[in-house]
Amino acid sequence: MSIRRSTRVPKERVRSSSETPEYEVGANDLKKSASQKRKTTKDSTSEKPHKRSRNVGKLAGFVQELPIEVVFSILELLDPATLINISRTNRQFRNTLLGTDYIWKAARRTVGLPDLCATDITERQYVLLMFDKNCHDCSKPNVQEIDLLSCARLCTACRRAIQLTFSQYRDLRSALHPRAIECAKRHPEKHAFDIPRGVVKISVRLHTMIPSEVKKFVKERSRLQEQIAMDAIKIDVWLRTQAVEKSQRYSALRKSREASIEERLLALGWTDSTLGERSLWTSHKAVNQPRPLTDRIWNSIKDRLTTDLSIALVERRNLLRRGAVDLRYRYFQLREHSPNPAQFPSYDTFLSFPCVEPFWQESTDPPPHNVHLRDLPLWDEEKWVAALPAIRAAVREYQEEMQLVESAAAWLMADCVYHPHPSYPLGDPRSLLC
């Protein structure tokens, strides 16, 4: 079966001389990457040009126009973390910073990181070891633990990967040079059969040496291990100092944030007596943060903070009022002289009486707003005296119910004795009290 195809020649659109192109094709447009060519659609020949961000490529062009001395002077003022990020922005910065140890050294000295006695790692590797949080083997982020003796930062999975069993460790020792493990960098004795980092490369290198060179190499590695141990002590002291300084800095920021929030709460109408109970609001998540308070942050946390503070004040007052009810409950229990003390309501039952609950329990649903201590009196003795008749009536009603429960329990116990049944649900009279 033949398919009929049209033989009409498509007409090309002829642009008149009055029409001007919106953009001209330049040399940069011809150098498109493969990913950009794949993203080209059928509408790429339309008259509208592709919209690009205003800042794309401007930094690279700006840096290329600067003298190299000016660029190096700027890089020397950066801290290590910023310098690491700059080295990963593009290939130009990476190639520039790979061979300039003095820039990394200047960045290291801005934070007071001590100089190393060992020379087995470069300044760049030293900075990456201390400030780059990625695992050295699998590049997993946010790895906090540093092994200063082996100069490595490893995640938990990579640390477990170098732990061998006794048979595996024995086979590895037999395949290595006899003095390879002696020359490898030490590591903390967390596992008896850990593989020292770089031991295979050291073993291959030792196999290519003559005995005199091996002896000299072992001596150099022993001296290097001593230097690394001394450097580890200095770095550990620096890390502890940094932790103390960070804690002090965060504490100062928290106090400054608390003072700013307290000032704004006072401006909203809260009183010093209300905010004097600082444990109610200083531990709030929106308050206890080591960052300055801005207008935007305050507007976002203001309603939530005031509501939570009002609820905390109500709950604190409820707790204090419950203690006041406890004293009056004991006095009431002694004054009533109940003939059967077992029938007198317990403290929790007494609190659950509808005539007693309003004296200690104030509802927080819906949440209160802008509650002050003056709105929450600790105790009202006049209301308590007025409610005593209702409380006595509730106690008598409870005692009458308990008498009925006890008589019913006695009858059921007698019924269970004379008519025992293994599946009888009320064999225990205490179940009536549940």
Image: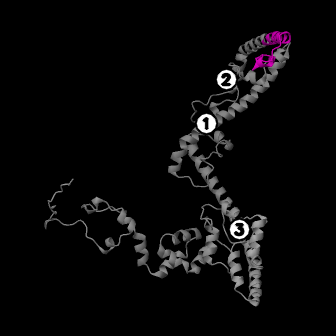
Which badge, 1 or 3, comes first in the chain's sequence? 3
Circles 3, 2 touching at the beta carbon (< 8 Å): no
Give the amino acid at mark 3: Asp
Q: Position of residue 85 (x, y in %)?
A: 53, 68
- Classify residue 105 by image quadrant: bottom right
Q: Alpha-carbon neighbours of circle 2 within 10 Å: few (<14), some, or many (≥20)?
A: few
- For mark 3, does the 10 Å Cα neighbourhood hold few (<14), some (14 to 19), or many (20 or more) residues? some
Does 85 sit left or right of 425 as displayed?
left
Could you say whether the residue bearing mark 3 is in a helix, strand or loop? loop
Q: Is residue 421 magenta?
A: yes
Could you tell me how far apart the alpha carbons at marks 1 and 3 are, in whole angstroms?
A: 49 Å
Q: Count the numbered circles shown.
A: 3
- Mark 1 nearby-residue class (10 Å; few <14, some 14–19, many ≥20): many
Look at mark 3 in the image and give the residue it sits on. 147
Q: Is residue 363 above or below residue 120?
A: above
Taking the spot 47% from the left edge, 81% from the top edge, the residue there is: 68
Disc 2 target residue: 358
- How far is the residue under mark 3 from the one under mark 2? 61 Å
Q: Give the residues in magenta.
A: 405-434
Residue tagged 1: 310
- The image shows residue 83 at horizontal and vertical percentages of 55, 71
Residue found at the far front of this picture? 1
Q: Is residue 146 left or right of residue 301?
A: right
The amino acid marked with disc number 2 is Pro
Amino acid type of the residue that numbered disc 1 sits on in the rendered structure: Ser
- Is the stretch drawn in magenta largely helix, strand or loop? helix
Q: Which of the two residues, 296 or 200, is positioned nearer the viewer here? A: 200
**Residue 27 location in percent, x, y?**
31, 75
